[in-house]
Amino acid sequence: MNKTLSAIAVLLSALPGVAVQAEEQLTFVSWGGSTQAAQEHAWAEPFTRETGIPVIQAGPTDYQRFRQMVESGTVEWDVVDVEADFALRAGREGLLAPLDLKQIAQRNIDPRFVTIYGVGSFYFSFVLGYNTQALNQAPQGWAALFDVKAHPGKRALYKWPSPGVLEMALLADGVAPTALYPLDLDRAFRKLDSIKQDILWWGSGEESQQLLASGQATLGMFWNGRVESLRREGAPVAINWQQNLVTGDFLVIPRGSRNKEAAKRLLGYASSAQAQADFATRSGYAPVNLGSLALIPSEQATQLPSAYTADQITLDFKYWGQQGEAIARRWQAWQNL
């Protein structure tokens, strides 16, 4: 098979009928919980039925372990769901296997979520989520998260240094969306100081859901799909979409993967229009394939970030890819004060 045909086969589609070695299998790593379950049902299972390649689920994603695997040459993971800023930084640092950008660009992918080192897994919004039973009135906008008198109770915030929390604090403090970058870190941390004693930190999607559904946190900043999943299950939760903050996850292949070609096939399958639509329908996260929205039932489509673009803000994960390590050091020092 020539290089052009091979690239099309391994990246753009999981072609039925292609011979598969008996020992070939992929290890797919993501964040666990309802998100990874949706990825397994929408991508991994149909990919295996079509290609015969088993996809083993593992996780959760761990950046330190990712780096150690690549640097030691003992890579156990083949496809990993990572946050956008890590994807850009890891690509620059040589931790990722490059893809065929020309072939990826032929797909109908939102240009925000494709690079030479990865293709979007999905995109999501950080939203203001709240427990409707724990609060007497619905909070309106990020400033409400800092108003402990009008909206008493603990606040749930993402504990890791990545795009979202600092931008949210600046918006709540009156910074215009167009003036967010470069981030005014002094101002952001001063704003967060005003509620620091009321913060409950969550480090995983499942943990965030537990805090909100139980009422331990009456409101907070959440991944929209996790709140939507709770809502579908009947939990007393709701979303305020004002200034929802968009970022995304990427699917990447660690440099040194022993199953790189099969991994590219899985990336091609997962980013196809139907696979993205199936995942979005299950998860509440938005598809990166621009052809997917037409395939999503209208009831589910109205609960996706793509339905709330009026004052939506796309976080600058390229900025974070460049400045993230320095911000992380300050973030960790502040958390430990």
Image (spheres, grey):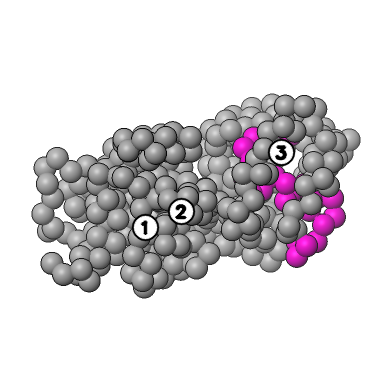
Question: As shown in the figure, which amino acid type bears the numbered disc 3?
Answer: Arg
Residue at 35% in and 60% down = 99
Q: Which residue is mark 2?
A: 91
Q: Earlier in the sequence, mark 1 or mark 3?
A: 1
Q: Earlier in the sequence, mark 3 or mark 2?
A: 2
Q: Is residue 255 something that shows in the picture?
A: yes
State which region is magenta. Answer: 154-179
Q: Which residue is mark 3?
A: 330
Residue 106 percent coordinates (x, y) = 36, 73
Is disc 3 in contact with disc 2, using a CB cutoff of under 8 Å? Answer: no
Question: As shown in the figure, which amino acid type bears the numbered disc 1?
Answer: Pro
Question: As shown in the figure, which amino acid type bears the numbered disc 2?
Answer: Gly
| Closest to the observer, 226 or 260 | 260
Q: CA distance from mark 1 to mark 3?
A: 31 Å
Residue 205 percent coordinates (x, y) = 55, 37
Residue at 72% in and 27% down = 336
* Label 1, residues with CA under 10 Å away: few <14, some 14-19, many ≥20: some
Residue at 22% in and 42% down = 25
Q: Which residue is mark 1?
A: 98
Q: Is residue 178 magenta?
A: yes
Tell me the quarter of the image containing the C terminus: top right
Q: Is residue 13 left or right of residue 137?
A: left
Label 1: element kind: loop
Q: Is residue 57 something that shows in the picture?
A: no
Is disc 2 in contact with disc 1, using a CB cutoff of under 8 Å? Answer: yes
On screen, 210 above or below 27? above
Residue 225 percent coordinates (x, y) = 54, 46
* Label 3, residues with CA under 10 Å away: few <14, some 14-19, many ≥20: some
| Closest to the observer, 308 or 59 | 59
